[in-house]
Image (cartoon, rainbow, N blue to C red):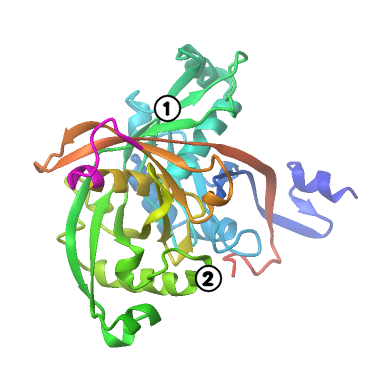
C-alpha cells in the first residue's frame, strides 16, 4: 500500500483504521512567523455573519483548531487562517473572502503577518470567478483584494507577474482598519509575588505602559521600563515572557483603555509588545510581541505595527506619510525581513477619538502543503 498516496487522496481509511477527519493545508511564513492556511476539509460554519461563524468555530469546532495548532500536528508557536468564503460583507460585495485567525489559545481579531501570507496565497490559488475578479483589478503591476477579518475590512495589495500570479520578489501590502490609542502613561503596579528578576532588582513597583489598537489591542512598553537595562537580548526571553505575562494579566482588566468604538467583541487585550528604541538605528525600530498564551511572534507583528504607528502619531513622534521599518528580535537575523509601516491617513473614530489608517508591507514564503488526518482510534484529537 502506498501510504503517501492514500493519505493525500480522498480515501477514508488507512489499512484497518478509518479516517474521521482529513484537512488539507498550505503552510507559509512571514518573516519567520508561520501561517497554516486551511484549504479543504474544515467543517461548514454556522451563522450569517463572520463574528457568528467565529463564535461557532470557538464553541462547536474548537477541536479542529486544537488538532491543527497543537502537537503532534502543530506546536506552541503555530498560527492558522481559516478561509470563510461566505460572510455578510462578501454577500454585500464589499469583501472578496473572509478569514478566521487562530493560534495556541483560541481566535484573534486581526493578524498582519497572516494577511500578508494570504495575499500572496489567494492570488496564486485563484481560479474561476475569483481569478477573473483578481485579474480585472491589475494595475501598475499589482492587484487588490478586500479581506474580511473579524476586526473589519483589510485591503491587501499584491504585486503580480505578467502571468497574473503573485510576484514574490516584491512585498505584499495591507491597509489596516482604523488604528488608535487606548491610553498612554498608564501606571501599572507590580505586586511583589508577580515581580520578575529585573524589576525586583531595580527596586521599582510600578511601570508605565501604553495601550493601542491596530486590529487588536496591545500593551506597548519599552524594554528598559521593565528593568532590562541591556535591552532586548535572546538570553532574556524567559524573563521577558514572564514580564509580558504579568503585564497582560494586570492590564487586561482595565476596561477603560480597552474600549472599542463599535465592536464589543474586540474589547480584550491580545498581546504585549516590548520595544527597544536603541536597536538597530535611525528609521528602524525593534520589538518582540508576546500574544495569546505566551506565544512569541517571530515577525514584527503586522497589527502590532499598526498599533505602534498609531501611538507614535498620537504622541507627536511621527507624521502622516513618514515611514519606519519595524523588526522583531528574530527578523533582524535575516536581511529584508522587517515590515515597513506608515500612517497614510488620519481618521475620526465613531466615538470622537482620532485614529490613523496604516500601511504595512512585508514578504511571505511557502513552506509546504500537507494533508492532516485524524484516525478514529487516535485519542489525540485535541492535541497536547
Q: Quadrant of residue 356?
A: top left
Residue position for label 2: 235
* Residue 319 quadrant: top left
Secondary structure of residue under mark 2: helix
- The answer to whether residue 214 is seen in the rendering is no
Looking at the image, which residue is at 41% across and 48% down? Answer: 281
Q: Residues within 10 Å of mark 1 (few under 14, many from 20)?
A: many
Label whose residue precedes the other's in the sequence (2 or 1)? 1
User: Is residue 300 on the magenta stretch?
Assistant: no
Task: Determine which quarter of the picture holds residue 155.
Answer: top left
Q: Position of residue 174 (x, y in %)?
A: 40, 33
Which residues are drawn in magenta? 312-323
Give the answer, above or below, for where 197 lies relative to 5: below
* Residue highlighted by disc 1: 96
Residue 252: x %, y % from top left = 26, 66
Q: Residue at left 32%, top 43%? A: 306
Disc 1 is placed on an element classified as loop
Magenta: predominant secondary structure element? loop
Residue 342 vertical position relative to residue 223 in the rendered view, above or below: above
Q: Is residue 175 left or right of residue 67?
A: left
Give the distance between the C-alpha atoms of the residues marked 2 and 1, in whole angstroms: 44 Å
Res 49 seen here: yes
Amino acid at each position: 500500500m502506498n501510504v503517501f498516496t492514500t493519505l493525500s487522496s480522498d480515501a477514508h481509511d488507512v489499512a484497518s483504521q478509518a479516517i474521521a477527519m482529513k484537512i488539507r493545508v498550505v503552510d507559509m511564513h512571514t518573516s519567520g512567523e508561520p501561517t497554516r492556511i486551511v484549504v479543504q476539509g474544515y467543517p461548514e460554519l454556522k451563522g450569517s455573519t463572520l463574528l457568528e461563524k467565529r463564535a461557532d468555530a470557538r464553541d462547536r469546532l474548537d477541536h479542529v483548531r486544537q488538532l491543527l495548532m497543537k502537537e503532534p500536528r502543530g506546536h506552541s508557536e503555530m498560527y492558522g487562517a481559516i478561509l470563510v468564503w461566505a460572510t455578510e460583507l462578501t454577500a454585500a460585495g464589499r469583501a472578496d473572502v473572509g478569514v478566521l485567525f487562530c493560534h495556541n489559545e483560541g481566535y484573534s481579531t486581526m493578524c498582519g503577518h497572516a494577511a500578508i501570507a494570504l495575499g500572496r496565497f489567494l492570488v496564486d490559488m485563484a481560479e474561476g470567478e475569483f481569478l477573473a475578479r483578481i485579474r480585472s483589478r491589475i494595475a501598475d503591476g499589482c492587484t487588490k483584494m478586500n479581506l474580511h477579518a473579524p476586526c473589519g475590512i483589510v485591503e491587501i495589495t499584491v504585486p503580480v507577474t505578467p502571468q497574473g500570479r503573485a510576484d514574490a520578489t516584491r512585498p505584499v501590502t495591507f491597509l489596516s482598519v482604523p488604528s488608535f490609542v487606548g491610553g498612554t502613561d498608564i501606571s501599572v503596579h507590580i505586586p511583589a509575588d508577580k515581580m520578575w528578576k529585573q524589576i525586583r532588582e531595580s527596586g521599582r513597583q510600578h511601570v508605565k505602559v501604553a495601550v493601542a489598537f491596530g486590529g487588536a489591542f496591545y500593551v506597548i512598553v519599552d524594554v528598559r521600563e521593565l528593568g532590562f537595562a541591556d535591552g532586548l537580548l535572546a538570553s532574556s526571553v524567559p524573563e521577558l515572557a514572564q514580564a509580558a505575562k504579568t503585564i497582560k494579566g494586570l492590564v487586561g482588566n482595565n476596561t477603560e483603555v480597552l474600549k472599542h468604538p463599535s465592536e464589543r467583541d474586540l474589547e480584550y487585550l491580545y498581546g504585549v509588545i516590548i520595544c527597544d528604541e536603541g536597536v538597530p538605528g535611525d528609521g528602524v525600530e525593534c520589538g518582540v510581541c508576546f500574544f495569546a498564551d505566551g506565544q512569541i511572534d517571530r515577525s514584527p507583528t503586522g497589527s502590532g505595527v499598526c498599533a505602534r504607528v498609531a501611538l507614535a502619531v498620537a504622541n507627536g513622534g511621527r507624521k502622516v506619510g513618514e515611514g519606519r521599518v519595524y523588526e522583531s528580535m528574530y527578523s533582524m537575523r535575516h536581511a529584508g525581513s522587517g515590515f515597513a509601516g506608515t500612517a497614510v491617513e488620519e481618521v475620526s473614530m465613531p466615538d470622537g477619538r482620532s485614529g490613523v489608517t496604516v500601511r504595512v508591507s512585508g514578504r511571505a514564503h511557502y513552506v509546504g502543503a500537507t494533508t492532516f488526518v485524524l484516525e478514529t482510534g487516535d485519542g489525540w484529537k485535541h492535541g497536547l
